[in-house]
Image (cartoon, grey):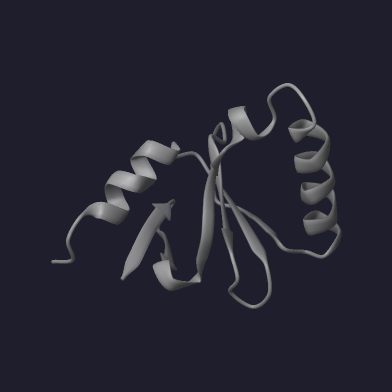
Amino acid sequence: MYLHAGQDFIINTRDILGVFDLDTATDAGQKPKLTDEFFRRAQREGAVVDISGAMPKSFILTDFSGETVYITQLSTSALKRRADRPEV
């Protein structure tokens, strides 16, 4: 099955490790520091693909060709609805 992640970008659902809300992933506590470090490392490794085209709302972590982070303008709930739709 495939997930339309926005901006005409399709991801195979078997490659998805997780879908994360950017607001909660960068909220108070230790999370912002850990998320920040994760994004910096992924950016250095060239593993960040920005498909948001606008204000980013979430990111999708995949294991396609190593870890890859796709930043999208879609919310986690919108991505879930798309993933739950039966294939046509």
**Residue with the most extreme front position:** 29
| Residue in the image at 29% along x and 50% along y | 82
Horizontal and vertical percent position of residue 58: 54, 40
* 62 or 50, nearer to the observer: 62
Where residue 46 sits in the image (x, y, percent)? 78, 64
Q: Please count the marks in the image.
A: 0
| In the foreground, 48 or 18 | 18
Q: Nearer the viewer, residue 10 or 66?
A: 66
Residue 68 versus residue 41 in the image, above or below: below
Residue 52 seen in the current view? no
Q: Is residue 68 above or below residue 26?
A: below
Q: Quadrant of the N terminus?
A: bottom left
Which residue sits at x=60%, y=34%? 22
Q: Residue furthest top?
A: 28
Q: Residue 56: horizontal and vertical position, in percent?
A: 57, 36
**For the point 18% across and 66% down, which residue is it?**
87
**Snapshot quadrant of residue 30:** top right
| Residue 18 in the image, given as x and y percentages of width and height | 53, 55
Q: What is the residue that sits farthest to the left in this orientation?
A: 88
Task: Work out which quarter of the rendered image holds the C terminus and state it.
Answer: bottom left
Q: Quadrant of residue 20?
A: top right
Horizontal relation, residue 61 to residue 15: left or right = right
Answer yes or no: is residue 71 visible. yes
Give left or right: position of 54 versus 4. right
